[in-house]
Amino acid sequence: MKKLIVLIVVLMLVGPSIGLLSVATLMNPAAISCGSGSLAVGSVPDSLTAQTRDGRSITLNKNQLTHAATIATVGAQTPGVGREGALVALMAALTESTLRMLANTSAYPESGNYQNDGLGSDHDSLGLFQMRSVSGWGTVAELMDPDYQARAFFGGLSGPNAGSPRGLLDIPGWQLLDPGQAAQAVEVSAYPDRYQNFQPVAESILAALTRPQSASAASFDQIVPETSQVAFPLPDGTYTKTDTFGMRTDPYSGESKFHAGSDLAAPAGTPILAVADGIVSFAGQRGTYGGLIVVDHTVGGERVASYYAHMYDAGILVAEGDSVAAGQHIGDVGSAGKSTGPHLHLEIHPGGVDQPAVNAEQWLAEHRAAGVAGAAVTTAGCTPERAV
């Protein structure tokens, strides 16, 4: 215990240079091991068409989407996976098999006796994730079972292989990796860069099949009143713009990657303000976002979702289902999740949480967001209590 206290003091003195770890994380290790929240898998559509990152259109049939639902369901049942882990698994299965259960009769004639979606020919690989029996992933019978393959891919304490070979949960800090890198860490492919191309498709699949269980069910159906105004998410004079929406050089990998938000650097503890009146649909830890608040709004008659990321647990001041006002103090700037220092990562999703993000700074400018001096706008009856 004395060592832990000393380590906490050191981290507090070092401050923003540590970036990725918080005192809250050290006191609660589960905060870093959990994924992005649980998943509720709904009905499977007959087909889905989406585009890969390089612009290629891909259409998945109901059978392929059923396999995707199996992966998401296993992810929902496996502690620590969450939406982020399910996304990684779908990217891997899309890349390896296009979400098809592939037999391999040239290597294992008996594999053709099991239900399958066709034949593969990559050495002696089998199934959705093209796993190899000789590498210890499982028997032929096991690897021809989609549920087993999903459990093997996720691994962890409930996985069938006890960490050898490693599943996603057996990789320390997988939540801090790019999803494509996390997929590669499990698959150990000779072509490590190909998984990233399928991230938009995987995201479309999750949007079609699932929604976060922890989001207030009412927020998806109830009418969110039109906002009275639009506010800037940080007080005037407290922030510096450090990264914008669009392609950028990733600060971790050095690679050119798409950035869905706008980054506003500010001292830790700076008040984060709601950009509009709305209802909180998520408040908690979510993978690389760290502490995340999602608020649903109606702006100009359109449903809009705003995302505020990288808070520590103690910096989340609202709970799911809360009504908030434009300019209300809803959280404090932190550096949890995939972060190199205290800042607010802001995303704006016109159409709602399942729709693509747009340039947040441009959206705020177009809606004439009012700057807020000092800590926050005070609104009668809307003072949030600190989350516990």
Image (spheres, rainbow, N blue to C red):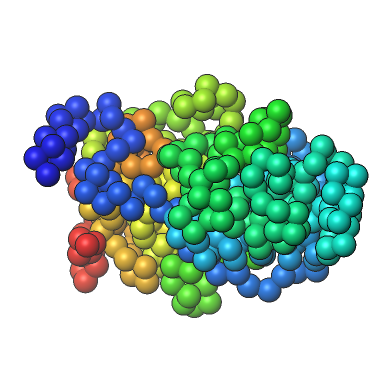
- Can you give x and y, in whole percent of width and height, for residue 262 in the image? 46, 38
Find residue 236 and report its image quarter.
top left
Number of marks in picture? 0
Find residue 75 and report its image quarter.
bottom right
- Can you give x and y, in whole percent of width and height, for residue 385 in the image? 20, 64
Q: Tell me which residue sits at (50%, 36%) in the image.
A: 177
Q: Quadrant of the C terminus?
A: bottom left
Q: Is residue 139 above or below residue 297?
A: above
Residue furthest to the left in view is 2
Q: Can the viewer see residue 307? A: no
Q: Quadrant of the N terminus?
A: top left
Q: Tell me which residue sits at (55%, 27%) in the image.
A: 248
Residue nearest the viewer, comparing 195 with 140: 140
Find residue 185 and report its image quarter.
top right
- Can you give x and y, in whole percent of width and height, for residue 333 in the image? 28, 43
Residue nearest the viewer, comparing 226 with 259: 259
Q: Tell me which residue sits at (58%, 63%) in the image.
A: 74
Left or right: where 340 falls relative to 179: left
Q: Can the viewer see residue 88? A: yes
Q: Is residue 153 above or below residue 361?
A: below
Left or right: where 40 falls relative to 130: left
Residue furthest to the top in view is 254
Residue nearest the viewer, comparing 158 with 199: 158
- Can you give x and y, in whole percent of width and height, for residue 142 in the image? 70, 58
